[in-house]
């Protein structure tokens, strides 16, 4: 384990030898040490000029991955403008190809208990590599970045947890299918792949979040007794019953997709053309739709 101390004037930075090559799985401590007397100082850490959540004097990187590559610095919380010198963490043989490595997920998923969920996923890597092992892990049971078991899927041992099915491949598709989802399946899931090169491996971190509810979507529109007339304004609202950050929606009228992706579908001036059956779904899981709201006209007026 390497221990790095950092400072600028009041701080001092010590790193590993310049000729030392870090490898995946190594543990690194970055220590921001103050050379002047302060009572319980708090710190700010930066990676590639982006602020990190830690305020401790030691930033612990327990199991390095390519994702940890970057330039690190620190500062006192009371004077963030004055930063330490930089410590660079990189991996030989991978850094120059870093833009070619990656895992892409569809985004957070909200699912109904008992439904089937397809986590769409794709991954990329340099063309000279060949993928040997693919894995999925649930962060409910796995710690770190999917280095060690348990896995919900592991191609190297051909093991799969009950209800999980890998429907991807070893080229670019990493889609995972979960059948009959239950509340216990609510978790963050991460995909990891390992190639035939020693440093050619990658974990999609952060992963994709799945939340399971009794009824994931609720469509609110008009009371059954409400009578509408042509020209009335109507709002249909698609509400998510589980926690998601900035969800996007899909709207349907008579099973035909509408262009809106907002949580509220606004019908500003009703006409006969607006008659139909409306429903909504999350963009990340279009197969699970809300109940239907019906808008129709009777004898020149509209009823819902």
Image (spheres, helix red, strand yellow):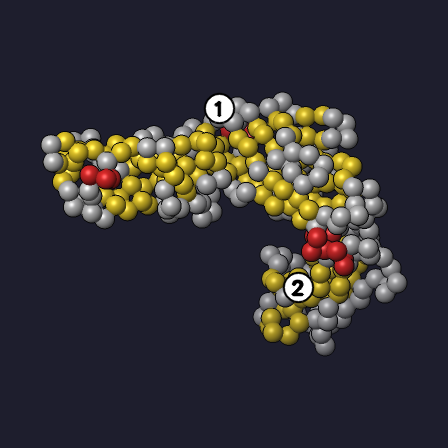
Residues under labels 1 and 2: Cα distance? 43 Å
Answer with left or right where residue 161 lies relative to residue 31: left
State the image quarter where residue 10 is shown. bottom right
Q: Is residue 161 above or below residue 89?
A: above
Residue at x 66% of width, y 62% of height: 47
Residue identifier under label 2: 48
Answer with left or right where residue 268 lies relative to residue 164: left
Q: Residue most toward the right?
A: 19
- Residue 108 is at least partly visible in this image: yes
Sooner in the amino-acid sequence: mark 1 or mark 2: 2
Task: Say few, some or many: other residues with alpha carbon within 10 Å of mark 1 (under 14 / 14 to 19 / 20 or more).
Answer: some
- For the residue labelled by badge 2, is the local secondary structure a helix, a strand or a loop? loop
Answer with left or right where residue 122 lies relative to residue 245: right
The picture places residue 1, in percent across and down from the top left corner, at: 82, 53
Q: In terms of depth relative to the viewer, which is nearer, 22 or 104?
A: 104
Residue at x 55% of width, y 40% of height: 209
The picture places residue 165, in percent across and down from the top left corner, at: 63, 27
Q: Residue most toward the front?
A: 273
Residue identifier under label 1: 114
- Residue 68 is at least partly visible in this image: no
The picture places residue 50, in percent across and down from the top left corner, at: 61, 63
Q: Is residue 199 above or below residue 286?
A: below
Mark drawn on residue 212? none
């Amino acid at each position: 384990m390497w221990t790095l101390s950092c400072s600028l004037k009041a701080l001092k930075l010590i790193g590993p030898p310049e000729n030392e090559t870090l490898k995946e799985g190594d543990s690194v401590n970055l220590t921001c040490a103050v050379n002047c007397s302060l009572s319980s100082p708090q710190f700010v850490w930066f990676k590639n000029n982006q602020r990190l959540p830690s305020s401790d004097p030691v930033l612990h990187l327990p199991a390095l991955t390519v994702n940890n590559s970057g330039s690190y610095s620190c500062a006192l919380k009371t004077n963030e403008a004055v930063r330490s010198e930089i410590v660079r963490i990189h991996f030989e043989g991978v850094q120059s190809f870093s833009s070619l490595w990656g895992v892409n997920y569809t985004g957070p998923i909200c699912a109904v208990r008992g439904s089937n969920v397809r986590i769409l996923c794709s991954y990329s890597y340099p063309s000279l590599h060949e993928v040997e092992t693919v894995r999925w892990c649930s962060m409910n049971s796995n710690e770190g970045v999917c280095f060690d078991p348990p896995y919900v899927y592991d191609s190297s041992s051909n093991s799969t947890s009950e209800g999980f099915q890998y429907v991807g491949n070893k080229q670019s598709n990493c889609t995972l299918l979960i059948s009959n989802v239950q509340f216990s399946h609510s978790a963050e899931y991460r995909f990891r792949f390992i190639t035939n090169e020693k440093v050619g491996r990658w974990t999609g971190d952060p992963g994709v979040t799945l939340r399971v509810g009794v009824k994931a979507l609720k469509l609110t529109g008009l009371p059954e007794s409400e009578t509408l007339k042509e020209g009335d304004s109507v709002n249909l609202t698609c509400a998510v019953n589980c926690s998601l950050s900035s969800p996007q929606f899909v709207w349907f009228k008579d099973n035909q997709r509408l262009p809106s992706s907002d949580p509220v579908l606004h019908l500003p001036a009703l006409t006969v053309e607006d008659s139909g059956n409306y429903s909504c779904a999350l963009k990340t899981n279009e197969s699970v739709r809300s109940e239907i709201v019906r808008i129709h006209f009777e004898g020149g007026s509209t009823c819902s």
